[in-house]
Image (cartoon, grey):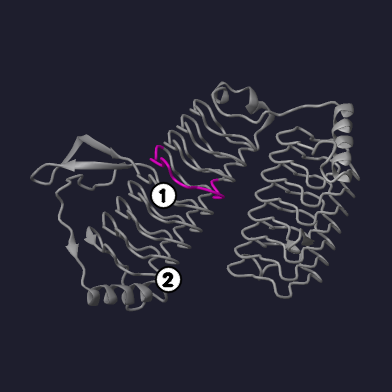
Amino acid sequence: MPQTLSSDTERSFSQVSLEELKTILRDHKKFLGSGAGGNRAIIQFSDLSGVVLTACDLSKADLTGSKLIKAKLDSASFCQANLFCADMRLATLRNADLTGADLRGISLRGADLTDAKLLKADVRPAMLARFDSRGNFQAHEIEEVSSQADDLIARRADFSDAKLDRSLLRQADFTDANLSNAALSGADLRKTSLIGTNLSGATLNGAKLAGATLTGAQLSGATLKGADFLGADLRGAILDPEAYELDELKMAVMPSLILKSDEEIKALLNDHKVWLDSSGKEGTRADFADFDLSGRTLGKSNLAIADLQRCRLNDANLSGSELAMANFEFSDLRGCDLAESDMRGTNLQRATLNEAKLDRCNLGPLEEIGTAGQNNPANLQSAKLIQASLCGALLKYARLAHADLSGANLSGANLTGADLSGANLTDAVLKDTVLTGAKLDEAKGLASA
């Protein structure tokens, strides 16, 4: 059934004074507590544009149709709140919690939802009912108002299990966001940034993704029937094997998936060794960008400084290899065996290393590089290391900001001086782990680790 909300665009908005707002918030706090003497915050069709409510708890509040244009709402809680047809254009909601909120018909154009939580939020179009001048419901006049989030900034935001069907999300920024199992049928995502975005299990039937950037996106288990991927960049994306045959992806920019024989791979490795030994004067630097090396046994290879961007290495064996300063950005290393490898200064930014073996790896900095004697730390920013094994690994000064280490085994690992800002350590094993001097600002799951 549609909301019994008039779609009259001339509706007037009431003004809420600062004193009135303070009283409403005080009573709502009591409502959320014991309930005694409290009242639920009901601020319908009010103009709160520019209001500053950072870290305020408005869970279960009713803000139907209200204006919150350019409001400052960082770290605020709107869990299970009613924001039906609210106007939150250009609002800042960094680290805000909108879990389970009713956001149907909302306008979030240009809003900043960086690191926000929108688990199971409803962002579908609103169904508005019209009334005649006497207030009688006009059953034959139903209007659909799409949720509008064009130019939305939602980097690292959590939209898992959210309902976003038919939403307008053009040119939005969902870099490294979690849209797993989200409903996005018919959504307009044209020219949207979905770099490193988790879309596993998402429903994208009939979605418009023309010109979108999905480099390094996770699309395992996603349904893509009737979706438009014209010109969408899917290089480095993780797809189900059968997805490569879909007509929906024929016009997308797809990974080249270069396949080589064992003999050809060996020849490339030999040329790379000559290049390393001669300091680049002879031979050729190994370029494995977009190669499919899944399941290969390449143990104890020398791939220092090699280019392995967007390389498929799932279930490959690289244990004991020389990989210092190699570039694995956006690569698929799920289940890869990298145990005891030299990975000093390696670039693993946005690589997927779920269930990979990195036991006793050296992921410390490569020291005294060049004439300036610079130190180059390993880069694992926004990498996915879910349930990876890093027992005894050296990760001194490693860059792990916003990395997903949930369920990872870091027993005996040395993370001295590592940057774990915003990293997910939920259910990680930290027995005898050294975290001296590590940056842990906004790291998640430390209490459970």
Magenta span of residues:
166-179
Left or right, 231 with respect to 298, comes to left
Residue 366 in sight from this viewpoint: no
User: Residue 32 at what x, y percent from top left?
Assistant: 40, 71
Outermost left residue: 133
Identity, as a three-letter code, of the amino acid under mark 1:
Leu
User: Residue 169 at what x, y percent from top left?
Assistant: 41, 42
Q: Quadrant of the N terminus?
A: top left
Whether residue 175 appears in magenta in the rendering, the answer is yes
Q: Is residue 262 above or below residue 30?
A: above
Task: Please report the residue visible at 48 percent of the width from the left and 57 percent of the height from the top.
Answer: 114
Q: Which residue is mark 1?
A: 152
Task: Please report the residue visible at 36 percent of the width from the left and 65 percent of the height from the top.
Answer: 72
Which element is circle 1 on? Answer: loop
Task: Please report the residue visible at 64 percent of the width from the left and 26 percent of the height from the top.
Answer: 244
Identity, as a three-letter code, of the amino acid under mark 2:
Ala
Q: Which mark is residue 55?
A: 2
Task: Please report the residue visible at 68 percent of the width from the left and 68 percent of the height from the top.
Answer: 448
Left or right, 329 with respect to 295, comes to left
Q: Is residue 110 above or below residue 394?
A: above
